[in-house]
Image: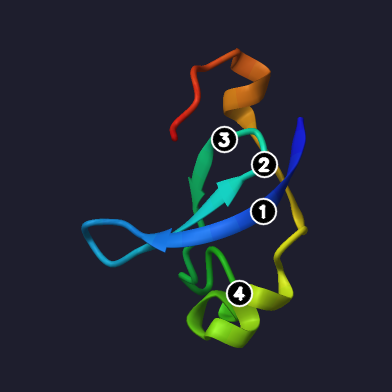
Amino acid sequence: MKQPIVGYHLDEEGVWVAELQCRHQQHIRHNPPLVSRPWVLTPEGREQFIGFELECKKCDEGAPRDW
């Protein structure tokens, strides 16, 4: 199920995590060539993706909220 990004935070390892409207969260790594998300590297890039929908597997599985 697709859910929009509503915010971000850094985890304990310094990796960006997207906070989704459903109250789940997902790591959003920029790890070329496997995953190319250069927008996560700057505040402007992350702001531009507020509202962007990510596939939330936790919603599909009925997992409890992360926050």
What separation in Å lies between label 3 and label 4 (alpha carbons)? 18 Å
Mark with earlier residue (3, 4) = 3
Mark with earlier residue (4, 1) = 1
Mark 3 burial class by Cα count in 10 Å: few <14, some 14-19, many 20+: some
Instruction: Give the camera-side residue of 5 and 32.
Output: 5
Residue at 59% x, 72% y: name it: 36
Of the residues shown, which amino acid type is indicated by label 1? Ile
Residue indicated by mark 3: 23
Residue 3, position as x, y percentages in the image: 73, 41
What separation in Å lies between label 4 and label 2 (alpha carbons)? 15 Å
Q: In the rendered structure, are the residues bearing label 2 and label 1 in contact, judged by CB atoms less than 8 Å apart?
A: yes
Q: In the rendered structure, are the residues bearing label 4 and label 2 in contact, judged by CB atoms less than 8 Å apart?
A: no
Residue at 62% x, 44% y: name it: 20
Q: Secondary structure at mark 4?
A: helix
Rendered position, 1 above or below 20 = above
Q: Secondary structure at mark 2?
A: loop
Of the residues shown, which amino acid type is indicated by label 2? Gln
With 56 as the anchor, is 19 left or right in this view?
Answer: left
What separation in Å lies between label 4 and label 1 (alpha carbons)? 10 Å
The disc label shown at residue 21, or none:
2
Residue indicated by mark 4: 46
Mark with earlier residue (2, 1) = 1
The disc label shown at residue 5, or none:
1
Q: In the rendered structure, are the residues bearing label 3 and label 2 in contact, judged by CB atoms less than 8 Å apart?
A: yes
What separation in Å lies between label 3 and label 1 (alpha carbons)? 10 Å
Q: In the rendered structure, are the residues bearing label 3 and label 4 in contact, judged by CB atoms less than 8 Å apart?
A: no
Q: Secondary structure at mark 1?
A: strand
Rendered position, 13 above or below 32 = above
Residue 27, position as x, y percentages in the image: 46, 52
Q: In the rendered structure, are the residues bearing label 4 and label 1 in contact, judged by CB atoms less than 8 Å apart?
A: no
State the image quarter where residue 24 is shown.
top right
